[in-house]
Amino acid sequence: MRKRKGAGRPTISDVAEKAGVSTITVSRALRDPSKVSDHLRRKIDNAVKKLNYVPHSHASALASTRSNIIGVIVPSLTNNVFADTLRAIYDAFDQGAYQVQLGNSRYVAKEEERLVRTFLGQGPSAMIIAGTDQTDVTRELLENAPCPVVQIMEIGDDPIDMMVGFSHFEGGRAAGMHLVQKGYKRIGFLGARMDPRSHRRMEGFKEAMRSGGRYDPDLIMTTTTSSSVTLGAELIGQLRARRPDLDAVFCNNDDLALGALFGCQKAGISVPDDMGIIGFNDLEMMAASYPSLTSIRTDRYAIGKHAVAMIQSALEGEMPDQKIIDVGFELQQRESTSRKR
Amino acid sequence: MRKRKGAGRPTISDVAEKAGVSTITVSRALRDPSKVSDHLRRKIDNAVKKLNYVPHSHASALASTRSNIIGVIVPSLTNNVFADTLRAIYDAFDQGAYQVQLGNSRYVAKEEERLVRTFLGQGPSAMIIAGTDQTDVTRELLENAPCPVVQIMEIGDDPIDMMVGFSHFEGGRAAGMHLVQKGYKRIGFLGARMDPRSHRRMEGFKEAMRSGGRYDPDLIMTTTTSSSVTLGAELIGQLRARRPDLDAVFCNNDDLALGALFGCQKAGISVPDDMGIIGFNDLEMMAASYPSLTSIRTDRYAIGKHAVAMIQSALEGEMPDQKIIDVGFELQQRESTSRKR
DNA sequence: TGTTATGATGTTAGCGCTAACATAATGTTA
DNA sequence: TAACATTATGTTAGCGCTAACATCATAACA
């Protein structure tokens, strides 16, 4: 007698036996209740409850060559921006029949490609990937993937499948225009990490400077070092050393902006009178700081929520209302750019 | 002819055929190369490379009732503290043969229990779970789980299996003692969320107050609201309204501490002379702020690294050196508690 | 009434892998 | 040299589920 023992927990056969039907009927009742008569469905539901049956996802994945995995790839786990979006994704999927599988590409394109391969190898139900700057190979893999794909965080005009985000270029431009309007004259840009989205914000900023007659490449200071508050203080120090006449900065993100504020305070420079500061993302701390910090508010949670909604309607076979959702952004003006002239 | 098509990618049989061996030999060569002769192993490795073979994890999981999943359960995705630990876990596992499966319990015990059930249902290779305050049911599930289990973030004397973290009680005590030593007299406690770890920090703090002759329950202000910088400013405002003589606070975490600093600045209270502030965790911003903020530094990345190392040695059948690893903490004294008397 | 569409359920054969046993080849001992 | 370990490889039968086809009942129609 050379039986294998299995995991011990109830199987679909146990349910089928208890309900007096065949296994495939149980399978159908669980996956698409409309395919089974009310009568049998009730019996099956009862049996499931009584046995405390939970489908073996691996068996299901093997038989159907399709798993209940939702692959999510982000470039950073510590960046608050992604954390908010991830939270939305987990919130939306946690109750349901799907398993979120998270990958961290660390801003490395090759790593991202590897993760896409790994995830696709599991026959995911859907993929969510941050950004629009995939390698050609990654893009092709995803275009041919037999599942919905949502690019998040930013939008562009050539989606792999679907997109939710906002225009970083426009966000950067709005920030720049705000500083011009506020009457600042020598407006700098501080940028860390300089991933593609940071670049687009910078380009938007430059555009605003040009149209406002304030463009000066000497006032742009960037580094590929990852962003931090400490770095913000350092960068503004360096830029001021180079250009003591600097009177405002747009920071690539809020950590830098907070750091820039601290840097100014340490150097005895008054914000906003001698230095205007604007950040990007509007993390919670921006409103609480003293002086409070102007920032471009983005709704990261909404991005995650929309992404999941798009996936769910795609999985239910509906055509989504739109392939590209722009959640926009909103300038939150606060004390750090409200100078009394 | 009623063949099923499969996923199209190469299977273990394809490799076996190409290498001129049986499938089980390929299986063994991949899982435990020492069980196969060099001769065949070379052939198999070649075939794998040529076919670009990747094992189908679902099939493997089904056949062995054991998946390559590492289940990780944390109470928050946005708290930087967990983000650092998660990053370490992802960094350590990303290259290998394991898949990290992340769950967010949202500080809800029942949710945690549900996640543990879900994960155990997949036959994980290991489980990592934050904290030591699981429900009895959760604990029992994990104690009987046929895989290594690591509790992270804190330590205690009754591990389910293994533990990595530090004593939050001692951390809180060290913070309290520091304020006493610095000569502060009416020392308050600000606590948000008040999860079990926050409680233990508070208890450590109280202990320090008692032993320093400074215990005053009226100076303790807590809320179950989740922590934020804004909240820190509010809480210190409320506590000062109640006790204008307050001259120092230990904040449950760094967000509150930063908020408390901003609150003081707004109210024109000089830090550290009129108000000492100490936080917990020592996030990066603490050193950068102005004035810089004293905090209890904890090594979250190390916790994740150790957890993975413990799991890996357990999976290789080794007895770990120790079941409980205390990564400790370190008081980082900065300007916010360095008063000139 | 017989023919055909429609829907509900069942039978069978895998999905790709590995546990459990079987066997062959080699070494080890008295 | 026989008797027995030990190691390397193979055979077979599932793991639990679902795709694909088959069957049966009922409704719908000419």
Image (cartoon, coloured by chain):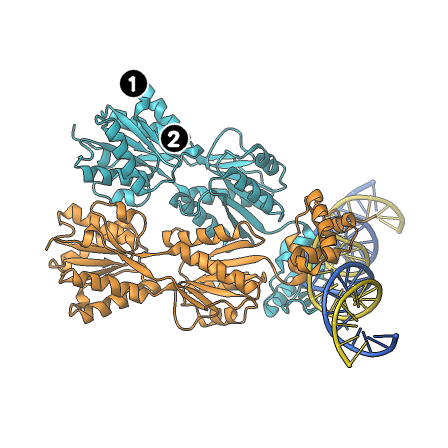
Chain colours: A cyan, B orange, C yellow, D blue
Residue B56 falls left or right of residue A264: right
- Can residue B275 be seen here? The reply is yes
Callout 2 crowding tier (Cα within 10 Å): few <14, some 14–19, many ≥20: many
- Residue A76's x, y, as percent? 44, 44
Circle 2 SS class: helix
Task: Place residue B98 in its image quadrant.
Answer: bottom right
Q: Nearer the viewer, residue A253 or A61?
A: A253
Residue at the (38%, 45%) spot, across then down: A80
Per the image, the residue denoted by label 2 is: A201
Q: Is residue B32 above or below residue B268?
A: below
Residues B141 and B327: in front is: B327
Q: Is residue A24 left or right of residue A185?
A: right
SS of the residue under disc 1? loop
Where is residue A44 shown, x and y percent of the image? 65, 64
Question: Foreground: A68 or A176?
Answer: A176
Residue type at mark 1 is Gly
Kind of residue indicated by mark 2:
Arg
Residue lying at 51% horizontally and 62% vertically, measured from the top left: B311
Q: Residue at x 40, y 52 (%)?
A: B84
Residue under disc 1 on the same chain as residue under disc 2:
yes
- Cα separation, mark 1 vs mark 2, equals 18 Å
User: As drawn, is A41 to the left or to the right of B23?
Assistant: left
Residue B126 image position (x, y, % from top left): 53, 62
Q: Which chain contains the residue that carries disc 2?
A: A
Observer-nearest of A267 and A284: A267
Q: Earlier in the sequence, mark 1 or mark 2?
A: 2
* Callout 1 crowding tier (Cα within 10 Å): few <14, some 14–19, many ≥20: few
Q: Can I make out residue A36 in this image?
A: no
Q: Which mark is residue A213?
A: 1
Q: Does A7 sit left or right of D3 as displayed?
A: left
Q: Quadrant of residue A193?
A: top left
Please report, as a chain letter, where disc 1 is located.
A
